[in-house]
Image: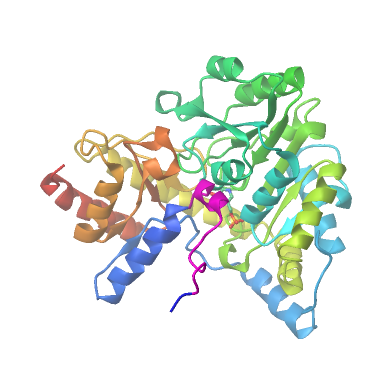
Amino acid sequence: MLAPNADRIAEAVSRLGSESAFEVLARARALEATGKHVVHMEIGEPDFDTPEHVKEAGVAAIRENYTHYSPSAGIAELRDAVAAYAAAFRNVEPFSRENVVVGPGAKPIIWNILSAILDPGDEFVYFDPAYPAYASCANYLQAKVVAIPLREEKNWRMDLDEFERRVSSKTRAVMINSPHNPTGGVLAKSDLQRIAELAQRHDFLVVADEIYSRNFYEGEFSSIAALPGMRERTIVVDGFSKAYAMTGWRLGYAIMPEPIAKVVTLFNNNTFSCVPTFVQRAGIAALQGPDEPVRRMNDIFRQRRDRMVGGLNALPGISCTMPEGAFYAFPNVSKISADDKVLAAYLLGEGGVACLGGSGFGAAGKGYLRFSYAASLEDIDYALAQMARCLPLFKA
Ligand SMILES: Cc1ncc(COP(=O)(O)O)c(C=O)c1O
């Protein structure tokens, strides 16, 4: 029997959101356990193995007894490696170790950053649809959360005039994410320049989630941190999950002004204490080792993107913009179903194709599906064939 108060949950919990990818993954696995063939396009993780030299570094680190606690901000060698890599990759003045905080994935680092900078009532601006953790955390912190829609017709960039109208000196922080989850959209340099100009005019911080900065298919990646006057007011979030196929290692980081880094470290200290030390040693190998595996994975992602987006656009009732980064396709399915989550559940149940309803990423995602094309060409072809078979039978 439960104790009388055992089922009383803190009221603040009602402000939390969740990432539907993990829920759909559990459902898809349960279906697989019954013997059904399922193509996993729901969870956002590279299907490649972690590069050999990174695995070797992790195993060697365990053998060398890097199995103890580390400082809460991360080991000095990894923070130095991140500082050097981040400045060289983004073409900015050198960062120092004091600017870098390491965590078990970018997700908890995002949580700790927002906890460090948002007071109740502070205005927090982000773009909808979005990675669900941003609004979940900001709402939990009781910030005043402002969602500005991204526009399919602008290849999933924002309307900058609308953005300008919605920010003011009351804005504490703006969260951007390019390349973008769930749409694969990429902000143009001119978008970043306008955001930077407004950040300086209204004195707000920019949190730039650049976790897909290595999953980039057209041209060169641009970071807002590299624009004049932005290094001081940008917090760059990045990590190892997507670039190096290291989702399960749980390793991410952010680079930020030193006073904020101290507080994010305090949150690390109060929550997970530190990232496993051997995982951090593997991270050094990823950053300092050969870059060829990252480029090879991206070449394969590009082929898969073309196959997936071409195939989606050939299906009646579906249209899909060409994503320039990340590994997601975000087709418009509003002509097929008024409820994207019902359609996603139908595709899983009937076709064995696991994908996500776009509305799980915010109101502006309604009418879309998100497919992670981190799957083999064979699986992509199978998924497209299953959709071609099942969609005409779908009853809205
Ligand atoms: C936009 C974005 N940011 C951050 C993360 C967090 O990644 P991780 O915690 O694995 O580093 C993800 C993962 O899906 C993501 O899509």
Magenta run includes residue 193: no
Residue most toward the bottom? 63
Residue for point 76% across, 69% down: 281
In the depicted view, which residue is nearer to us: 208 or 268? 268
Where does residue 338 sit, x and y in percent of width and height?
24, 37
Where does residue 67 sit, x and y in percent of width and height?
77, 79
In the image, is residue 237 above or below residue 143?
Answer: below
Residue most toward the front? 4
Direction from residue 103 to residue 317 in the image, left or right: left
What is the basis of the colouring in this image? rainbow
Quadrant occupied by the N terminus: bottom left
The quarter of the picture where residue 234 lies is top right
Is residue 329 something one can see in this rendering?
Answer: yes
In the image, is residue 174 above or below residue 274?
Answer: above
In the image, is residue 395 above or below residue 219?
Answer: below
In the depicted view, which residue is nearer to us: 108 or 146? 146
In the image, is residue 376 above or below residue 263?
Answer: below
Quadrant occupied by the C terminus: top left
Direction from residue 194 to residue 41 in the image, left or right: left
Which residues, given as a range, are shown in magenta?
Answer: 3-18
Residue for point 26% across, 51% down: 384
Where does residue 177 sit, x and y in percent of width and height?
58, 38
Direction from residue 293 to residue 394 in the image, left or right: left
The quarter of the picture where residue 206 lies is top right
In the depicted view, which residue is nearer to us: 15 or 283? 15
Where does residue 248 sit, x and y in percent of width and height?
57, 67
Direction from residue 382 to residue 14 in the image, left or right: right
Residue for point 72% across, 71% down: 276
State the predominant SS element of the stretch in magenta. Answer: loop
Question: Number of numbered discs present?
Answer: 0
Residue for point 52% across, 45% down: 131
Is residue 288 something one can see in this rendering?
Answer: no
